[in-house]
């Protein structure tokens, strides 16, 4: 089994390997491709453009030819999966799986973003999932966190996210969802409420479910 991951930050390779180990996946199941240029272009453009989406979709389609499932791990680029077209295997955005899991919670859901370009796609995703399940949600941007990430200050980045998650619980959130894969490490630092939901684990679970659904059934 091969799950191909398209990342925009090299550090997310380790994040997903950790999530895979937690789920009991064997070493070598995940194949990583890192394209920081795609997110850099989106940040310069102020968001996802048609041209960037098309380039991302082409990269996803290429990965689909040698995998059992493909995961797009960047929330900013997430809508690109909608234009991949016919692919031989499932092509999934990890934040969609996260939104579905979060919407199963009772009460208010707060989704945290670290970079401004993820706010619009995250809001659209969570709005749809919340409407289907009848829950309330709010998307919050963790101010200045992305500057720490870009500067290589991982500890400062995760601490800022954990602080925002604790504040969300103090404000009445039932569950906090960390919308970007790079935020996953902050979950262990949260003290004021349940462990936040993270997109790497949600995305991998969704991929495994889709792969299992496609597997041929053995007649007894």
Image (tube, rainbow, N blue to C red):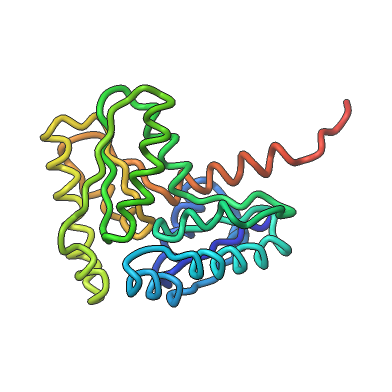
Image point (47%, 48%), residue name = 22
Near-viewer residue (76 or 105): 76
- Looking at the picture, does residue 77 appear above or below residue 107? below
Which of the 4 image quadrants contains residue 84?
bottom right
Q: Is residue 86 left or right of residue 44?
A: right
Residue 58, given in percent of the width and then of the height, sits at: 62, 67
Image point (69%, 39%), residue name = 212
Name, please, the residue furthest toward the front: 50
Residue 89, given in percent of the width and then of the height, sits at: 70, 52
The quadrant in which the N terminus is found is bottom right
Residue 100, given in percent of the width and then of the height, sits at: 44, 35
Residue 174, given in percent of the width and then of the height, sits at: 24, 29
- Looking at the picture, does residue 143 appear above or below residue 8? above
Q: Is residue 34 left or right of residue 163?
A: right
The quadrant in which the C terminus is found is top right
Image point (23%, 66%), residue name = 146
Q: Is residue 146 left or right of residue 63?
A: left
- Looking at the picture, does residue 194 appear above or below residue 24? above
């Amino acid at each position: 089994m091969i799950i191909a991951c398209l990342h925009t930050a090299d550090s997310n390779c380790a994040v997903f390997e950790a999530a895979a180990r937690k789920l009991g996946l064997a070493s070598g199941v995940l194949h990583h491709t890192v394209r920081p240029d795609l997110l850099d272009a989106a940040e310069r453009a102020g968001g996802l453009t048609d041209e960037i989406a098309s380039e991302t979709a082409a990269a996803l389609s290429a990965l689909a030819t040698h995998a059992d499932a493909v995961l797009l791990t960047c929330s900013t680029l997430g809508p690109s999966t909608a234009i991949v077209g016919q692919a031989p295997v499932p092509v999934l955005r990890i934040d969609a799986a996260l939104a579905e899991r979060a919407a199963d919670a009772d009460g208010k859901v707060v989704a945290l973003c670290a970079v401004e370009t993820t706010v619009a796609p995250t809001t659209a995703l969570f709005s749809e999932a919340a409407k289907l399940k009848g829950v309330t949600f709010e998307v919050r941007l963790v101010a200045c966190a992305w500057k720490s990430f870009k500067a290589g200050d991982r500890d400062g980045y995760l601490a800022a996210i954990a602080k925002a998650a604790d504040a969300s619980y103090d404000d009445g959130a039932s569950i906090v969802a960390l919308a970007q894969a790079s935020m996953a490490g902050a979950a262990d630092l949260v003290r004021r409420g349940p462990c936040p939901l993270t997109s790497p684990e949600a995305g991998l679970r969704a991929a495994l479910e889709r792969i299992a659904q496609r597997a041929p059934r053995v007649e007894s």
